Amino acid sequence: MSPAGRPATPAPVTAFIGLGSNLEDPEAQLRAALLELAELPDTRLIARSPFYRSAPVGPPGQPDYINAVAALDTRLQPQELLAGLQAIEQAHGRRRAGLRWGPRTLDLDLLLHGDQALSTPALTLPHPRLTERAFVLRPLADIAPGLVLPDGTTVETHLRRCPQGGLVRLET
């Protein structure tokens, strides 16, 4: 408790959010989502990566994805931040029914929340496939090149081990 008897405000932590879209003008979807991330309560957008084009992971025949990573300073707890991300996705027409890893207007993944490790039915931190995907590692390395992940390795180390899979940086 604070001296005035109110609960103490938590210190901000840096959270990293993966952004992806392959429907309905994906670059515009990501630009709008970045603005909306900055408007989350008790949260400030501190960095954003360039956009990248990547081949889809999942069912064949879908368009390429546009991906990026954003860094936020937030006082929100992981579950609160996840709820905010899902609300933004829904506002962009995201539907969770259908094929896993299928096409989508907007996908926002909570990659890291400080150095917190968490495993619940709704949320796993760090994101379970963070170290396997160049379309996440490359933009993350762009904005946090020396970042050490909770497993003790750097983002750059994982990026060197990860196949790039045709990842293309866009002029954005």
Image (cartoon, grey):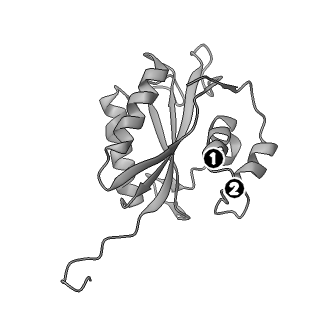
What is the CA distance from the residue labelled 2 to the residue labelled 1? 16 Å
Q: Taking 66 as reference, is 105 left or right?
A: left
Q: Amino acid at mark 2?
A: Gly
Judged by depth in the image, the label closer to the viewer, 2 or 1, is 2
Q: Nearer the viewer, residue 117 or 51?
A: 51
Rendered residue at 63%/28% (across/down): 57
Residue at numbered disc 1: 130
Numbered mark located on residue 122 in the image = none
Rendered residue at 60%/13% (across/down): 61
Which quadrant would the C terminus be assigned to in this image?
Answer: top right
Q: Amino acid at mark 1?
A: Leu
Q: Residues within 10 Å of mark 1 (few under 14, many from 20)?
A: many
Q: Is residue 82 visible?
A: yes
Whether 52 is drawn above or below 140: the answer is above
Q: Taking 129 as reference, is 166 left or right?
A: right
Residue 72, given in percent of the width and then of the height, sits at 45, 51
Residue at numbered disc 2: 146
Rendered residue at 78%/51% (across/down): 157
Q: Taking 117 as reference, is 155 left or right?
A: right
Q: Earlier in the sequence, mark 2 or mark 1?
A: 1
Residue 111, given in percent of the width and then of the height, sits at 54, 49
Q: Is residue 97 visible?
A: no
Which of the 4 quarters of the picture holds residue 34? Answer: top left
Q: Residues within 10 Å of mark 2 (few under 14, many from 20)?
A: some
Residue 143, given in percent of the width and then of the height, sits at 60, 46
* Element marked by disc 2: loop
Q: Assess whether mark 1 and mark 2 are in contact (beta carbons under 8 angstroms).
A: no
Rendered residue at 37%/44% (across/down): 38
* Element marked by disc 1: helix
